[in-house]
Amino acid sequence: MRIYGKKRALNALTNFGRSGRMPHALLLYGARGIGKRTLADYAAMIYMCDKHGAVPCMACNECRRVEEHIHPDVIYPLQLMGDKERYNMDGLRQLISDCYIRPNDGDIRVCVFEKLDEMLPQQQNALLKFIEEPLDFNRYIFTAEKKVPILETILSRVTAVEVDGADESGFAAGLAENGIPGDRAAELYERFGGNIGAAVTFEKSGKELSYMTAAADAANAIAARKELDCLTALMSLKTREELFETIGILSDIFAEAAAKRGGKPSSGAFRTQADKLAGAYSMKALTKLYNEAVRLYGMSFTNPNIRLFAGECCGAFFDAADM
């Protein structure tokens, strides 16, 4: 297993392992493509490794089986449910019931719940008792893009670690592993920051992800105070999931712009948009834009009418910007 970048997240996991206090429930959150699944596998190795060190040895039978996704006691519920995109209540109830039985092969079972932020509230509630009163042999790893749609009762019972991207050298190495040369990597780093997964998807498909384009266009329009252009960008989205992603990215851009306004250099995939916004608005306005994006991101989880919601988002952003 090769992990590029993610220094802050890796340091956090190493410190947990060194102290002997790996959380019973761990949340790894960050942008799509940033490498949450890889880091979840790495964390599962820490739980399962025969060496029981601060970092997994990656050589023992336990680590090898985790890396190859063949360990009988490391479970990926979405795959078990036969749908890699959505959870269902019957599947969750069956999983919870099965997890009251001792592990198949050792002393610990690890459940890796991907896309926690896409679980419906009633599905999250079904997990609540499962994680707040854990059996001594169960450990939980959750992944999510944002913490906003996750119930506070869940968040209060997990240890959250933000998954950061790769630095420029790590980004280039990750792209080289996927057959993308160094000269191209430099261009892609300007566009995607340290998000290797997003860059590889773009390069192999020949098309930028629609929600990334929409987020960049909407941010540019807000910076230029062109409400119709913002509406056009958001209206270009076809699905709830795309709108969900776009609003989440916009919240990151507004946060980056506020940091820039406060004197911190811009970084990441949308630094150009962040710089424009920082130059166009006050800290107070940028903070309000961020708060609106967070609020709307939570609302997008409720499956609204896409076109109506796109219009509501546009109006809310310009109301915030014109405070």
Image (cartoon, helix red, strand yellow):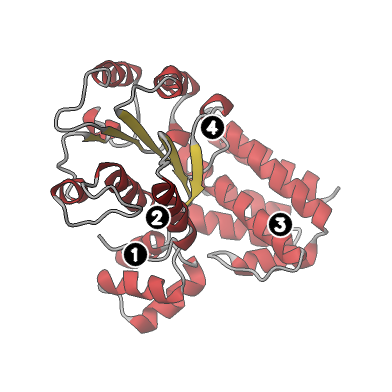
State the image coordinates of residue 243 (x, y, percent, origin top left). 52, 43
What residue is shown with label 4? 155
* Three-letter residue code for mark 2: Gly
Disc 1 and disc 3: Cα gap in Å? 28 Å
Disc 3 and disc 4: Cα gap in Å? 32 Å
Q: Secondary structure at mark 1?
A: helix
What residue is shown with label 2? 33
**Residue visible at 47% across and 35% down in the picture:** 117
What residue is shown with label 3? 222
- Marks 3 and 2, the one that precedes in the sequence: 2
* Three-letter residue code for mark 1: Val
Dot 2 and dot 1 residues touching (CB under 8 Å): yes
Q: Nearer the viewer, mark 1 or mark 3?
A: 1
Disc 4 and disc 1: Cα gap in Å? 31 Å
The residue carrying pointer 1 sits among few (fewer than 14), some (14 to 19) or many (20 or more) residues within 10 Å by Cα, namely many
* Three-letter residue code for mark 3: Ile
Taking the image as shown, residue 201 lies to the left or right of residue 192, namely left
Residue 200, labelled with which disc? 1
- Marks 2 and 1, the one that precedes in the sequence: 2
